Image (cartoon, rainbow, N blue to C red):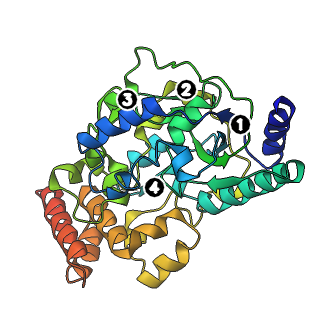
């Protein structure tokens, strides 16, 4: 098993993963944290976090026979010159979370994990396994932490000491008694940069995230109206948020990804809110084909951009674009367009 474990890590890198670790299936500490998080209703309307009983924290119940978990990470930061702050401070540009600018990572990583599993099966006939990429009740960050891929930081993202946090995670649940890795020591220290920078104060304490306040939740997971108290705080962030990662000192060690599929498409890394708001539903579906963005749907897309336009600097063109959507068939869109129009009027210079 020691030799096989070494081979698995070598094969994993050949298939494009930057790091591979092995963990056991004892997630009792993570289970306690999850129970408390759910009891505080920090999951908001993500009801799926409460489903499946103990399967999320008991891998052997999700996949009977599981003994160890192969955990992998794949970097997605594509460009060392990508300037987050430059876009966030330009109120008329759209900010989309870095992970969603290119192709959806799920299929790419699942395919690579399947190749790795196939390779292992060529060596071990009795292998039983299941591949996961954010696709089942799996505590991927807790598993990755146990596998030595990093530690869960105060913003609740996984941080790697030599690679920062701009990476995706995936797992192979397996029946093999592989050699496990040691968990990584926590290295956040007294730093509170991620807590201090959060626009909506969603990080309510070290290692405690209230999803109901998180911009990623508000713009992606939430299907209803964005609470008015948070709309102005969203700024021009129309799909997710990277602030807590961008400010993390450990991301100075992040390395650009070699995956071309993770490069930005349709200039989404530097595009105006007005241009995106002008997309028809047909254009939205075409331009987000194979993208993580598509899953929120066109109406939520317009909802988010409307809020961004409301927070933008006053422009007659913005007023005109919002007016054109004022009678949109979706009540969700209409509500946020009306809010944006009122917000724009407040920004209107007195001389106009």
Which residue sits at x=63%, y=40%? 80
In the image, which is nearer the foreground, mark 4 or mark 2? 2
Q: State the image coordinates of residue 216 (x, y, percent, origin top left).
A: 37, 51
Q: Position of residue 111 (x, y in %)?
A: 72, 60
Whether tag 1 and tag 4 are in contact, CB under 8 A, the answer is: no
CA neighbours of label 2 inside 10 A, class few (<14), some (14 to 19), many (20+): some
Inter-mark Cα distance, 3 to 2: 16 Å
Q: Earlier in the sequence, mark 4 or mark 2?
A: 4
Q: Secondary structure at mark 2?
A: helix
Could one spot residue 247 in this view of the protein?
no
The image's mark for residue 55 is none
Foreground tag (2 vs 1): 1
Mark closer to the observer (1, 4): 1
Q: Residue 96, which numbered label?
A: 4
Q: Which mark is residue 207?
A: 3
The residues bearing labels 3 and 4 have C-alpha atoms spaced at a distance of 24 Å
- Name which of mark 3 and mark 2 comes first in the sequence: 3
Residue 162 visible (yes or no)? yes
User: Which quadrant is the N terminus positioned in?
Assistant: top right
Q: Residues within 10 Å of mark 1 (few under 14, many from 20)?
A: some
Taking the image as shown, residue 35 lies to the left or right of residue 268, namely left
Mark earlier in primary sequence (2, 1):
1
**Marks 4 and 2 close (CB-CB < 8 Å):** no
Q: Which residue is mark 2?
A: 250
The answer for how far apart the CA atoms under marks 1 and 3 are is 24 Å
Task: Establish if 109 lies above or below 56.
Answer: below
- The numbered mark, 1 or 3, whose residue comes first in the sequence reads 1
Numbered badge on residue 19: 1
């Amino acid at each position: 098993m020691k030799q096989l474990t070494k081979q698995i890590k070598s094969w994993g890198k050949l298939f494009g993963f930057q790091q591979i670790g092995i963990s056991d299936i004892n997630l009792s500490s993570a289970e306690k944290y999850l129970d408390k998080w759910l009891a505080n209703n920090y999951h908001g309307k993500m009801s799926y976090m409460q489903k499946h009983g103990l399967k999320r924290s008991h891998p052997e119940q999700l996949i009977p026979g599981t003994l160890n978990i192969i955990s992998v990470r794949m970097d997605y930061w594509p460009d060392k010159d990508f300037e987050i702050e430059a876009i966030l401070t330009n109120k008329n540009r759209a900010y989309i979370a870095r992970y969603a600018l290119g192709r959806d990572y799920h299929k790419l990583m699942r395919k690579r994990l399947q190749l790795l599993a196939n390779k292992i099966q060529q060596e071990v006939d009795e292998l039983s396994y299941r591949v996961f990429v954010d696709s089942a009740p799996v505590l991927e960050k807790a598993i990755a932490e146990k596998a030595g891929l990093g530690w869960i930081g105060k913003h609740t993202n996984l941080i790697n000491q030599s690679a920062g946090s701009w990476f995706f995670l995936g797992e192979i649940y397996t029946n093999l008694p592989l050699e496990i890795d040691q968990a990584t020591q926590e290295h956040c220290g007294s730093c509170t940069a991620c807590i201090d920078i959060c626009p909506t104060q969603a990080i309510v304490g070290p290692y405690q995230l209230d999803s109901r306040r998180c911009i990623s939740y508000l713009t992606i997971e939430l299907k209803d109206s964005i609470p008015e108290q948070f709309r102005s705080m969203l700024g021009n962030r129309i799909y997710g948020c990277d602030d807590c990662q961008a400010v993390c000192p450990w991301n100075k060690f992040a390395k650009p990804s070699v995956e071309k599929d993770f490069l930005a498409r349709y200039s989404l890394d530097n595009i105006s809110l007005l241009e995106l708001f002008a997309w028809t539903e047909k254009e939205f579906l075409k331009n987000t084909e194979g993208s993580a963005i598509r899953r929120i749907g066109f109406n939520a897309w317009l909802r988010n951009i409307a809020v961004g336009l409301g927070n933008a600097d006053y422009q007659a063109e913005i007023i005109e674009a919002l007016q054109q959507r004022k009678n949109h068939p979706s009540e969700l869109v209409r509500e946020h367009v009306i809010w944006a129009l009122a917000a724009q009027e407040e920004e209107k210079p007195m001389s106009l």
